[in-house]
Amino acid sequence: MKMFEMMKQVQQMRKIQKTLAAKTVEIASNDKLVTVVARGDMSIERVTINQELLGQTKHDRLERTLASTINSALDSAKKAAASDMAKLTGGMGGLSDLLGGG
């Protein structure tokens, strides 16, 4: 691979990383107790717990709901990121597959 092509791919990767960090998905649990906002870079931006429903909820149920909702948010963020990466890296050969977009 030529040096110029490698530099171009590095620049494209930086652009992708910025795009993914800016992309967010919001997922609420079925009972609306927990809402999670995840970013395309697989980080959690925010977790919100509905105060009105919290008093009616047992501790272990809250823990299960948090884990499930966070996992759903990360899964949605991963799918959104893969879709965006496929669009952004379409002309970059195997890079799209390496990043999960293929």
Image (tube, rainbow, N blue to C red):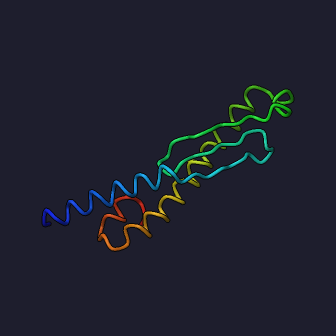
Residue 63: x percent and y percent?
A: 68, 31
**Whole-percent x, y for residue 61 in the image:** 75, 32
Left/right of residue 97 with respect to residue 2 in the rendered view: right
Q: Is 39 placed left or right of 4 in the picture?
A: right
Image position, residue 70 (x, y; %): 62, 42
Quarter holding residue 34: top right
Name the foreground residue: 82 vs 23. Answer: 23
Q: Say which residue appears at 38% left-offset and 58% top-offset.
A: 99
In the picture, measured across the screen, residue 49 lies left or right of residue 38, that is: right
Question: How many discs appear?
Answer: 0
| Horizontal side, residue 24 vs residue 56: left or right | left
Could you tell me residue 92's position as x and y percent? 30, 69
Q: Which residue is depicted at the point 40% across and 52% down?
A: 17
Question: Which residue occupies the foreground of this view, 17 or 102?
Answer: 17
Instruction: Name which quarter of the figure residue 87 lies in.
Output: bottom left
Residue at x-position 85% and y-position 27%: 55
Residue found 16% across the figure and 65% down from its top: 4
Q: Is residue 28 above or below residue 54?
A: below
Image quadrant occupied by the C terminus: bottom left
Q: Quadrant of the N terminus?
A: bottom left
